[in-house]
Amino acid sequence: MIKASAVIGFIILTTIVNLVGMRTSVGTLGVMTVVKLVPLVALIIFGLATRDPAVGFAVPQFGEFESVVLLTFYAYMAFENATFAAGEMRNPQRTLPLALMTTLGAVAVFYMVVIWAYLAIAPEVTDNENALSAAAEALVGQTGAIVIAIAAAVSICANTLGGGIVTPRMTFGMAEQGLLPGIFAHVSRRFQTPDVSILFYGGIAVVFSLWAGFATLAVASTLSRLVMYLLAALLAAASTLWVASHAKSEAYEVFGFLLVVGTGLYFLSRRRSVEAAQAV
């Protein structure tokens, strides 16, 4: 009951923040980002400085990787959500591409460094224990575990707030184009925000928070995006085949010749590389 009340209370809080305006939402999200990153950065620095950073590499056993692959997809998804709020940005043509590329690269490096520090610390983790909390506890005791747990909670809250920023803009745009009921395109006169879409998102978030845990919801979110990616890939494949069907037979003959020659040159190069390696 306490857990559910805390979750619902935070969702209500983030909904109010999103209603007030983009500037307030982004500012709050920035504060949460700092709060969740500082303990992780401290864990990385202290862990690599006090433990042996020279760790081995091992491929995960079959049955382990596929159990977390959807959560791995989730960790690298949703960067494109920043484009949903482009209409409320200054100079989005320049800002968005730069933000997308730098954020994706920085996050990938940060994930790698966190994993490196965790492997260097090598804590003993039980089935029901958070891995990073266990690492922090191994370094500085129970206080470290509590700090990392708080950072994880703030991270989930920031994820919810981020969804509350971008998703209502998507439903707002769909309503403007007639893909959803027009009520979702309503804009608050005072705050100039898509208030109906924001309130709808907050209500749905409350329902889902009572339905399942974060991991289950994360996987469900991943599945919804994978379906969209699949549809986009199918449309791309269909359009490619349709365009290719209009080529003349002579063009296919030239293409076939280039394909055969290119393939032959590739295998010839590979054969010579193998022979040179064996000679050494």
Image (cartoon, rainbow, N blue to C red):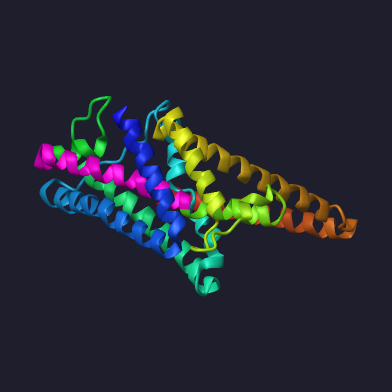
Instruction: Tell me if residue 266 can be seen.
Output: no
**33 with respect to 229 (left or right):** left
Q: Main secondary structure of the magenta part?
A: helix
In front here: 108 or 196? 196
Residue 205 in picture, x, y percent from top left: 47, 39
Residue pictured at 22% horizontal, 47% vertical: 117
Which residue is at 56% across, 43% downward? 225
In this rendered view, identify the residue nearer to me: 204 or 31.
204
Q: Residue at x 62, y 51 (%)?
A: 184
Work out whether residue 60 or residue 254 is closer to the camera in this orientation and state it: 60
- The quarter of the rendered structure image containing the N terminus is top left
Where residue 249 sits in the image (x, y, percent)?
Answer: 89, 56
Based on the picture, tell me whether residue 141 belongs to the magenta stretch: yes
Query: Per the image, is 115 magenta?
Result: no
Q: In the rendered view, tell whether residue 10 sits above or below residue 192.
A: above
Residue at the image position 85 percent from the left and 52 percent from the top: 245
In the image: residue 270, left or right of residue 3: right
Residue 136 coordinates in the image, percent (x, y): 17, 41
Boundaries of the magenta span = 138-164
Image spot of residue 91 (x, y percent): 52, 75
Residue 225 visible, this angle: yes
Asked which quadrant contains residue 122, the reply is top left
The answer to whether residue 248 is left or right of residue 83 is right
Q: How many marks?
A: 0
Q: Quadrant of residue 228?
A: top right
Q: Does 121 sit left or right of 85 as displayed?
A: left
When asked about the image quadrant of residue 66, the answer is top left
